[in-house]
Image: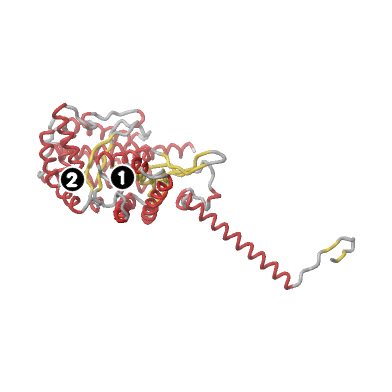
Amino acid sequence: MNEGSNGENIPPIPSQDGIQEILHKVIIAHQQALALLQQTEAAYGRLVPHQLLNLLEAKSIVDVKLGDQVERKMTIMFSDIRDFTPLSESMTPAENFEFINSYLSQMEPVISRHHGIIDKYIGDAIMALFERGADEAVSGAIAMLERLSYYNAGRERAGYAPVQIGIGLNTGMVMIGTVGGINRMDSTVIGDAVNLTARLEEATKTYHSPLIISQNTLYDLTDAGKYDIRFLDRIRVKGKSQPLSIYEVFDNNPAELRESKRQGLALFEKAVAYYHMQDIVKAVPLLKRCIEIAPEDYPALIYLERCHAFQASGQHLGTGELQTSLSWKEELHTGLPEVDNANRILMYHINTLTTRIAQDDCRDFADIFPILHQHAQHIFPVEVKLMREHAYPFAEGHIQEHQRFVENFCGLERKAGSSSEDPRYLAFRTVLLLLDWFASHATKADRHFARYLQNKKTG
């Protein structure tokens, strides 16, 4: 070691070879640290999906903070194994874990291929999110049921009983973010749309239908005609004053049953409509015909049983939505006078048509269609202009809902003009569309836009 002029010891200067060796060690250490970081990121990615980080606009897990949140329109999926409790009771804890993981390992790649984000595994249940629209979610659910058939074939070869699952899908606005405390936080999705999705998954058990979607998901599909879908029922969700329509997707039914349901689809939907209108005399023969065509059509069997119960006791096991008028409440106000006035007028016509259906006075029900055209031509351009002016981030989805609404009531208008259908049945389908529209758009989408404008003014 050299000694400086002031007596301090100065370390020797490394040779050229020594410098290269030090640099080599630094590079190796850096590469090892980078590899460890990549492994850690990959491990966290299995716990917190990278797609979820992207939604939260975080580059990595270390960027995620408690309270981070973002609002998105999503299709939410809930999937659950039916009768899992008795199945699990026949297995040891180790066998339970092995079974659940073997099942989930079949479903996870299918959801990922359809750009779904698995938010949570809840025991045997899966909660997933689809940001790219309802088509990805519905086609993903259909693919999951196809994969289940493959999985069950393997179980049967191994001497195990097949498993059945139920899938519920709903589309709506949700908040995605992080919740918890200083030492433990988790990602979560919050919103009415999530609660309804869970309710739909429960309904799959009632109707023995593997896949049920909401009205919101149906109307978000690019082309609903690509799938085998039929109207199933109206259900009430806790805390909601008006029931919501649900639909069965039966693409995954066994080939013979699927073809039979296709053949009897119009009969079934008419029978369900007559049941809801409490016209049991017309509903019963239609349901019997459906069952002749498809003896294993469980929803048809359920409705026939309801009809017999109604005839015996007078008890209508429906929601009674056509006997209850909509009422304008303070919480329906958007604060946009022109929008509120248009929605008030629409509500009046919905109630008028509902009354006419109840009184079986539907010969001239088609008078509603010029009113709907006038409503769309008047208020929709007003909303679009405001959205463009104020850079509303969800404008495209809102406008798409306008287009779907017009397409649907124009389709019913064409059927009414052909005079080939019972006017009362078409009136029911029209008021069903209007009730769904009012519940999902006028009281949700319009109010969401109004809150955006209010926040922008006060922000």
Residue 301 marker: none
* Residue 119 image offset from top left, x and y in percent: 43, 47
Mark-to-mark CA distance, 2 and 1 = 17 Å
Please name whichever residue, 79 or 227, is drawn nearer the observer in this view of the structure: 79
Identified by mark 2, the residue type is Glu
Q: Of residues 12 and 368, which is closer to you in this image?
A: 12
Indicate the quadrant where residue 406 lies: top left
Task: Name the residue nearer the viewer: 206 or 103.
Answer: 103
Say which element carries label 1. strand
Q: Which residue is mark 2?
A: 296
> Around disc 1, counting alpha carbons within 10 Å, would you say few (fewer than 14), some (14 to 19), or many (20 or more)?
many
Q: Is residue 425 left or right of residue 253?
A: left
Q: How is colour applied across the structure in the image?
A: secondary structure
Q: Going by the picture, which residue comes out furthest to the top?
A: 313
Q: Is residue 297 visible?
A: yes
Reading the image, the residue beneath label 1 is: 166
Find numbered disc 2 in the image and state the secondary structure of the residue it sits on. Answer: loop
Residue 392 seen from this side = no
Q: Is residue 458 above or below residue 329?
A: below
In this picture, is 143 found above or below 342? below
Image quadrant containing the N terminus = bottom right
Asked whether, in this view, residue 112 is left or right of residue 57, the answer is left
Amino acid beneath label 1 = Gly
Would you say the residues marked 2 and 1 are in contact, meaning their CB atoms lie under 8 Å apart? no
Number of marks drawn: 2
Give the mark, 2 or 1, whose residue is nearer the N terminus: 1
User: How many other residues sit within 10 Å of disc 2, few (<14), some (14-19) or many (≥20)?
Assistant: some
